[in-house]
Amino acid sequence: MAYFDSNAAYAYEYQAQAYSEPVRRERLEERPAQRPRLDVVPGAGREANQAVSPVFTHVVKVFAALVLLFVSIGLARVAIAGYTTSMLNANAELSSSLEAARDESSNLEVMNSVYGADTRIRDLATGALGMVEPEDSITIDLSDPADAAQGEASAANGQDAAQGSSATSNR
């Protein structure tokens, strides 16, 4: 390169300012934007060990255990509630049947006292059936063995008398 000036330093600086700055500006404008840096990591590709992080597996196991615990507690609550409901229904049914049995028992006691009354039986016997009261009656005491033999004899006499009276009423 030839310098046309006597002072080489001046000429060098002059030319550098005159020609190099516009060239730099053009070069900066022409230069495309910088690309992102791409790093290549050597590896085995699809055959690489794709192990999951131990922390992630621990979190998944804890989550699964909590879900299992939640479900089992829910099932236990449902089972206990069902059992309680069935027991309450059985108790209510038993109480209602017990109450019905008490009502029936009180009705039967009333019916027994009404239908078993001596006066009602006498009225029915005399009114509807035409029966009359006996004129004499026999009382047997079986507390003494010696009296028991007499009671048997008098019972036999009473039975003969009853057969004779039934024979006369049939005529």
Image (cartoon, rainbow, N blue to C red):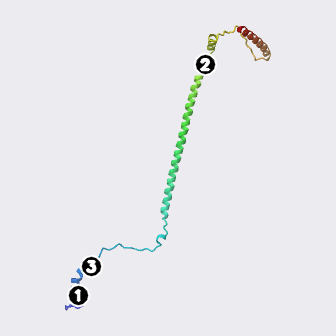
Residue 36 in percent (x, y) is at: 35, 72
Q: Is residue 163 above or below residue 52?
A: above
Crowding at mark 2 (Cα within 10 Å: few <14, some 14-19, many 20+): few
Q: Secondary structure beneath disc 2?
A: helix
* Amino acid at circle 3: Arg
**Disc number at residue 142?**
none
Name the amino acid, label 2.
Ser
Mark 1: few, some, or many residues within 10 Å (few <14, many ≥20)?
few
Q: Please state which of the two labelled residues, at mark 3 or mark 2, is closer to the viewer.
A: 3
Foreground mark, 1 or 2? 2
Question: Which residue occupies 58% across, 25% down?
Answer: 104
Pointer 3 or 1: first along the chain:
1
Cα separation, mark 3 vs mark 2, equals 130 Å
Marks 2 and 1: in contact by CB < 8 Å? no
For the residues carrying marks 3 and 1, which lies nearer the camera in this image?
Answer: 3
Q: Residue 12, labelled with which disc?
A: 1
Which is nearer the eye, 167 or 110?
167
The quadrant of the image that shows the C terminus is top right
| Residue, disc 3 | 27
- How far across and how far down the image is residue 123, in percent? 62, 12
Which labelled disc corresponds to residue 113? 2
Rendered view: 63 above or below 91: below
Which quarter shows the N terminus?
bottom left
Residue 139 appears left or right of 125 = right
Amino acid, disc 1: Tyr
